[in-house]
Image (spheres, helix red, strand yellow):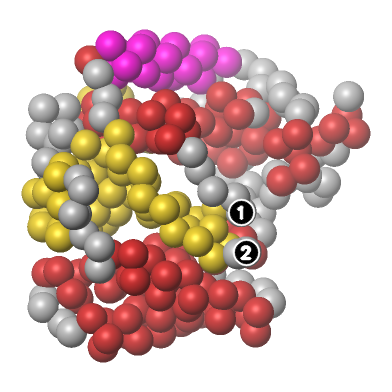
Amino acid sequence: MGIQLKNLSHSKLNSYDWCPRKFELGYGQGIWPPPPPRLLLGRSFHVGMEYYMKAVYLRGTPSKTALEDAQTAMEYDYLFTQKGPDYEAVIPQGKMMIDAVVQSLQAYEISVESCEGWLRKNLSDMPFIGKADVLTAGVKSAHQNHGRTIIDWKTADKMYDQQKVDTDDQLTAYSWLTQGQYDTVAFVVVTKDPIEVQWFFGERTDEQIGLWKEKALNTWRMIREATVFPGQYDWHCDYCEYTPTYCQGRGEW
């Protein structure tokens, strides 16, 4: 009998596909080392953007006021919820990243339906959940006109490309979770140094969604049946929070 889970998500399946040992340390043994500052910043950035989008698009708060409050929300989350280190350098960077994304929003007319909304659907015998950053009734710009769109914020060390968006499993999972309801999926990517923002839009075909579902079911079957969880030692080890305290990473080759 493998690890018992209450639900599935993209992050859980991705964790197993990335490294079964990492998956077992977290979801099996309940060991969750503190994430590195770059991941903590990403979480707090999402808190700030959630505050901004709800304030401006759902409550009608003026953008300038909402921006200042969103930056404060990001700062408080990093300091007191995430308890992140190096705050004197990280906080100003996070505020500039939120400002850059807010500036990029001015090029789009967005009809926001909800922010940070949970999506749920059964994958075989298990609930599969996902949390969409923004669900919209449409996204328009001077050169593009998209229908109902799921927007996902991404903080990154380097900029994505269109191929990443067109093949990303997380966005495909969102398409499956909302199949027939949303036409478009989108990543809004902000890099940290230098700070740059780009919007990427994509769609998913029925074939892509079917292949993703087949892959997800196979990963879930392996999790259920697994009795050992070997490490998958590659370049990911250099960025893994379990290395070297709980795992020697490439040193175990």
Q: Residue furthest front?
A: 143
Query: Label 1, on which residue?
Result: 157
Q: Verify CB contact (< 8 Å) between mark 2 and mark 1.
A: yes
Q: What stretch is highlighted in magenta?
A: 207-226
Residue drawn at point x = 83 percent, y = 46 percent: 244
Dot 2 or dot 1, earlier in sequence:
1
| Residue 61 picture location, percent across and down | 16, 82
3D distance between C-alphas at marks 2 and 1: 7 Å
The amino acid on which the numbered mark 2 sits, given as a three-letter code, is Asp
Against 154, residue 26 (above or below) is: above
Locate residue 99, reporting x and y percent. Answer: 40, 75
Q: With respect to residue 194, does 140 lie above or below? A: above
Q: Is residue 145 visible?
A: yes
Instruction: Quadrant for residue 119, please give it.
Output: top left
Say which element carries label 1: loop
Residue 34 relative to residue 199: left or right: right
Amino acid type, callout 1: Asp
